[in-house]
């Protein structure tokens, strides 16, 4: 004779509850706010003194959205249901730790973005928000290596912020 275990019953009801309340894994919503499926991504503006962040962030955001299985990144505003615009509003790289000789041993780079999703033909706002991240990296006496490490930190930040933006938009928060 088949006997139901209490753990099985509890698991079954938990699964039913999660399915009924719309639970899903972050970033795996099906569409952008407003049911948008086709999006045009404008080049992000760079409001900082650090060069090339506009290109770095724009490329990261576009790559992230192109990996979506439910969205289509289009080539022009005319093809889009919505337009994503944004700007790099803050960038800073500064020392955060020192060695026993008072030399810098670690830097922290911080970056903040603001973004807006709007209906392509009317300009009506669907979503607007700000995101920020930080990344630490080891200091170096070699200037070229130091610059490479800062650039690598900026690339990591751009990718992470692109992921965060994608998740926030698809979760419709």
Image (cartoon, rainbow, N blue to C red):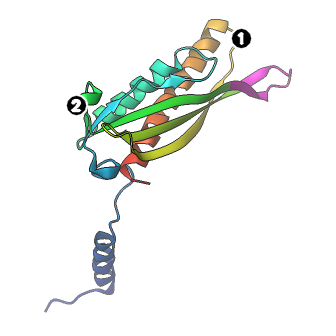
Q: Residues within 10 Å of mark 1 (few under 14, many from 20)?
A: few
Among all residues in the image, which is located at the extreme front?
A: 122
Helix, strand or loop status at disc 1: loop
Residue 85 horizontal/vertical position (percent): 43, 32
- Seen from the viewer's position, the closer of residues 20 and 151 is 20
* Whether residue 161 can be seen here: yes
Between 117 and 95, the one lying in front of the other is 117
The part of the image, by quadrant, that contains residue 41 is: top left
- Crowd tier of the residue under label 2, counting other residues whose Cα lies within 10 Å: few below 14, some 14–19, many 20 or above: few
Residue under numbered circle 1: 141
Tell which of 154 and 56 is nearer to you. 56
| Direction from residue 148 to residue 15 in the image, left or right | left
Q: Position of residue 8 (x, y in %)?
A: 28, 80
Secondary structure at badge 2 equals helix
- Looking at the image, residue 38 sits to the left or right of residue 94; the answer is left
- Residue shown at 13%/92% (left/top)? 1
Q: Which residue is mark 2?
A: 79
Q: Residue at x 35, y 34 (%)?
A: 64
Q: Is residue 171 magenta?
A: no
Q: What's the magenta region?
A: 93-106
């Amino acid at each position: 004779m088949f006997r139901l275990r209490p753990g099985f019953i509890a698991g079954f009801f938990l699964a039913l509850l999660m399915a009924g309340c719309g639970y899903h894994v972050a970033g795996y919503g099906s569409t952008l706010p407003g049911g948008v499926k086709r999006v045009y991504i404008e080049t992000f503006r760079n409001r900082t003194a650090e060069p090339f962040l506009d290109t770095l962030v724009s490329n990261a955001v576009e790559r992230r959205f192109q990996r979506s299985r439910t969205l289509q990144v289009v080539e022009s505003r005319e093809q889009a249901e919505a337009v994503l615009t944004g700007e790099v509003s803050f960038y800073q790289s500064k020392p955060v730790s020192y060695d026993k000789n008072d030399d810098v041993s670690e830097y922290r780079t911080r970056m903040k973005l603001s973004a807006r999703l709007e209906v392509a033909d009317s300009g009506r706002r669907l979503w607007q928000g700000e995101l920020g991240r930080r990344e630490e990296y080891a200091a170096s006496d070699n200037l070229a290596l130091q610059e490479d490490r800062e650039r690598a930190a900026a690339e990591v930040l751009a990718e992470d912020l692109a992921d965060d933006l994608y998740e926030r938009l698809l979760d419709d928060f």
